[in-house]
Amino acid sequence: MKMTFELLLTALALALIIEGLIPALFPNKWRAYVLKLAQETPQSIRSLGITIIIIGIILLWLAS
């Protein structure tokens, strides 16, 4: 499959839409989560980020 600029832009747009859903639908819960996240250690936040990346890679692999 050839990666085109249009496909990349579509993927970015979908990511932004999905990222915006939670704060748009549940602003109070999202704020509480962000405040709690700010109290976590950098290593804990890094582990969360790596976990999310791995889940994304697996989903991308399953979709292809």
Image (cartoon, rainbow, N blue to C red):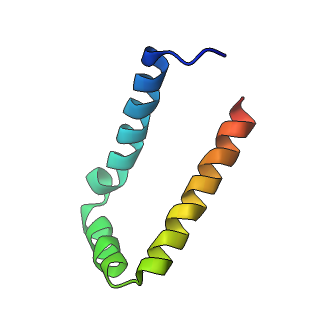
Please indicate whether residue 31 sits to the left or right of residue 45 in the image: left
Quarter placement of the C terminus:
top right
Which residue appears at 50% of the width and 15% of the height? 4
Viewer-side residue, 22 vs 7: 7
- Placement of 37 over or under 16, stated as above or below: below
- Placement of 16 over or under 34, stated as above or below: above
Viewer-side residue, 39 vs 27: 39
Q: Measured from the top left, where is residue 53 in percent x and y?
A: 57, 54
Which residue appears at 36% of the width and 76% of the height? 37
Please indicate whether residue 51 sits to the left or right of residue 28 in the image: right
The total number of labels drawn is: 0
Viewer-side residue, 35 vs 1: 1
Q: In the figure, residue 27 lies in which quadrant?
A: bottom left
- Placement of 46 over or under 39, stated as above or below: above
Q: In the figure, residue 32 lies in which quadrant?
A: bottom left
Q: Measured from the top left, where is residue 62 in percent x and y?
A: 74, 38
- Placement of 3 over or under 44, stated as above or below: above
Please indicate whether residue 20 sits to the left or right of residue 60 in the image: left
Q: Measured from the top left, where is residue 52 in percent x and y?
A: 55, 58
Which residue appears at 39% of the width and 83% of the height? 40
Q: Measured from the top left, where is residue 45 in percent x and y?
A: 45, 73
Quarter placement of the N terminus:
top right
Viewer-side residue, 54 vs 18: 54
Which residue appears at 42% of the width and 39% of the height? 15
